């Protein structure tokens, strides 16, 4: 029984990682399509959404069944609870990747406002945060989770920078306003992805330390 229970926990861990890999790919391909102006790649992102949505359902069912049948205590219960909360944030990351895709569907039919520099950088940092968050979850590494959270400020800074720069384009040429506004929305979707990665890190810290660091302001 104990061996089977450990296998169930391992299977849950692997399923969470699989979902994390999918939403990271969705984010990567959506931004790659936008930067490289490859509209055909957007269909790949949309195709992955169905897999993510199914995994979202599967993970919740696995967690609820384990809680009901195995009656986990202490560390195992925190692990399962963290998996459920992380599952929700990952599904929302997938939603944000779809939002980026929808913005890209318009932007790839019109001339670019400017070369994209800060938006791809935002995406890269957000993906790094997600990877570190999931590594921290798998390895029970709260220090890695803390370090990933600190990267959120850089994403916020880049989002503000994108807004200021695009505002100058809109003021100089009102014809750029629709395209610039869509790029501003892309930056906001990426900021939300980083926020969800931060949530995952906070869940990992609670899982490892039993410490709730939400709403505590910036980390030192």
Image: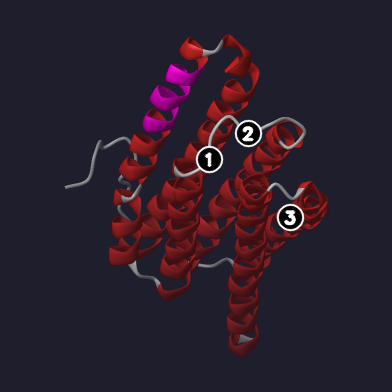
Q: Looking at the image, which residue is at 41% across and 26% down?
A: 165
Point out the tag, 1 or 3, that comes first from the N-terminus.
3
Q: Looking at the image, which residue is at 25% across and 36% down?
A: 217
- Does the stretch in magenta take in 162? yes
Which span of residues is magenta-colored?
A: 161-169
Mark identifier at residue 185: none
Quadrant location, the N terminus? bottom right
Seen in the image, is 187 located left or right of residue 29? left
Mark 2, residue position: 112
Q: How many marks?
A: 3
Tell me which secondary structure the magenta stretch mostly adopts: helix
State the CA–CA distance, disc 3 to disc 2. Answer: 31 Å
Mark identifier at residue 115: 1
User: Could you tell me residue 116's position as x and y percent?
Assistant: 52, 42
- Does the stretch in magenta take in 40? no
Q: Looking at the image, which residue is at 39% across and 71% down?
A: 140
Mark 3, residue position: 52
Seen in the image, is 214 located left or right of residue 128? left
**Is there CB contact under 8 Å for labels 2 and 1?**
yes
Disc number lying in front (3 or 2): 2
Which type of secondary structure does the marked residue at label 3 adopt? helix
How packed mark 3 is, by other alpha carbons closer than 10 Å (few <14, some 14-19, many 20 or more), is many
How packed mark 1 is, by other alpha carbons closer than 10 Å (few <14, some 14-19, many 20 or more), is few
Disc number lying in front (1 or 3): 1
State the CA–CA distance, disc 1 to disc 3. Answer: 31 Å
Which type of secondary structure does the marked residue at label 1 adopt? loop
Dividing the picture into quadrants, the one containing residue 61 is bottom right
Which type of secondary structure does the marked residue at label 2 adopt? loop
């Amino acid at each position: 029984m104990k061996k089977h229970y450990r296998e169930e926990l391992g299977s849950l861990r692997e399923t969470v990682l699989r979902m994390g890999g999918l939403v990271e790919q969705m984010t990567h391909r959506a931004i790659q399509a936008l930067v490289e102006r490859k509209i055909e790649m957007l269909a790949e992102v949309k195709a992955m959404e169905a897999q993510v949505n199914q995994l979202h359902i599967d993970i919740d069912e696995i967690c609820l069944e384990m809680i009901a049948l195995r009656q986990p205590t202490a560390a195992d219960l925190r692990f399962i609870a963290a998996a459920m909360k992380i599952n929700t944030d990952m599904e929302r990351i997938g939603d944000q990747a779809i939002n980026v895709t929808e913005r890209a569907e318009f932007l790839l039919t019109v001339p670019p406002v400017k070369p994209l520099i800060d938006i791809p950088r935002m995406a890269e940092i957000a993906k790094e945060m997600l990877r570190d968050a999931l590594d921290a979850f798998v390895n029970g590494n709260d220090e890695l989770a803390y370090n990933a959270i600190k990267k959120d400020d850089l994403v916020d800074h880049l989002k503000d920078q994108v807004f200021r720069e695009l505002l100058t384009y809109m003021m100089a040429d009102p014809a750029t306003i629709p395209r610039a506004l869509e790029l501003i929305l892309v930056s906001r979707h990426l900021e939300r992805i980083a926020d969800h990665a931060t949530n995952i890190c906070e869940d990992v810290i609670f899982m490892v330390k039993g410490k709730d660091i939400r709403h505590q302001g910036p980390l030192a």
